[in-house]
Image (tube, helix red, strand yellow):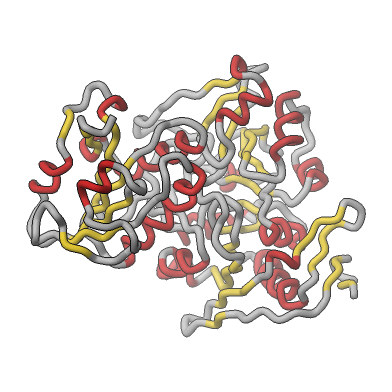
Amino acid sequence: MTDRRTNIYISAAHVLDSVLPSGMTILKCRLDSIKWNGTSGLQIACQKTHDNIRKAAISLLEGKIVAFPTETVYGLGANAFNEKAVNSIFKAKGRPNDNPLIVHVSSFKMFEKYFSQPMPSSYDILTKHLWPGPLTILVNSPETLPGETTAHLTTVGVRMPSHPVARALIEISGTPLAAPSANSSGKPSPTTADHVFDDTFQRNEAREVMDFILDGGSSDIGLESTVIDGISEPGKIKILRPGGVTVEAIANIVGIENVIYERNTVVSDDFKPNTPGMKYKHYSPNAKVMLILPSTAHSKKERSDPTEIIKKLPPNQRIGCMTLSGSDLTKKLIKTDDDNLTSQKSSIRDDLEMIPYMLGSSRDTATIARNIFGGLHALDKIKVDYIIIEGVSEVNEGLAIMNRLYKAAGNIDNLYLFKDLV
């Protein structure tokens, strides 16, 4: 049958929701029931999934915020053109209001309706290849978009997510959604509905404006979108934030000679970012993070031996080990890497408890990317004191992974180089 209010095809199936004592509801959605048809548009073959997305859409149109899944991480969305609702995002997250939001659209038709303006030819070809997907493009902000959404800048980042629940929510809402990641400001980004509930929803400010979390399973990519600027320097694409689309993929489309990326990890207090993730400390768990790199990665840092760093830690500490399967570092730190989150005694010091969380093989950076935020959340939840993370080579997904890990470590004093890991 067809819902005449939305012209969206629906049919019956059963999905169980979670109504929590707090009054907030986690609304389950079946991803395989949501399809996009070239002629008839959005189709949802599960009545319960349609009803749940519609509940969330109505909540958005009433000025509330909703957490929802994307292929990158979970987002915290509001009507991008509702000034009060957008302000609720900043309050719910504890996010500085000079940190602009990314606006999400469901289709090229919606993008053209709200962001009708001349675009560089590079955007045309990139969006043709990479939308829907984890690519955000910087465009001139329309006058109708509130300054709260753009941090009062003249530009705004826009993307079309590929996650079926995200696109369906935006489409049924009938308006673009402003949405940062759905974590408390500065904490690791959530890749499951449970991460959102365990973190952001524990804030009183979030509970006041948020009734629903749409549960669409785990995020496929696990890192936020890549943000590019193709308007400030004609003919060039600047990578403002590495993410779900690799720099190599962009270079293959527009030519490596037209791509600019500067690794800028230190900015001044008065710096005004034009996209999220450029100024503030991000992705940091409660535990202290120690980032481990090969000695070739940073010429000015003193080389260390992993056993010496472990020996200098305070007594009776619980240490999470986010390392690579079968790596030299893994072999030095833990006895067995078979079971994630299974406590074991340190082979270096008997008073230390080592808790492994394997990131995956060094040859599979896509899997590592999916596991980064999940590992930080899991180890934070069991209240470890330190988290040791093994870095990867900064190619393909590795560039975005290391961008996030540098921010998680917080400062260069938490970065160590092992002379035997080359």
Q: Residue at x 11, y 50 (%)?
A: 313
Q: Position of residue 355 (x, y in %)?
A: 26, 60
Q: Residue 23, relative to residue 295: is it above or below?
A: below
Q: Position of residue 317 (x, y in %)?
A: 15, 59
Q: Residue at x 29, y 25 (%)?
A: 296
Q: Is residue 281 left or right of residue 160?
A: left
Residue 377 at least partly seen: yes
Residue 94 at least partly seen: no
Q: Position of residue 284 (x, y in %)?
A: 34, 50
On the rendered image, what quadrant is the C terminus found in? top left
**Which corner quadrant of the image does residue 79 belong to?**
bottom right
**Which corner quadrant of the image does residue 152 belong to?**
top right
Q: Residue 161, relative to residue 402: is it above or below?
A: below
Q: Residue at x 74, y 55 (%)?
A: 175
Q: Position of residue 307 (x, y in %)?
A: 13, 44
On the rendered image, what quadrant is the N terminus found in? bottom right
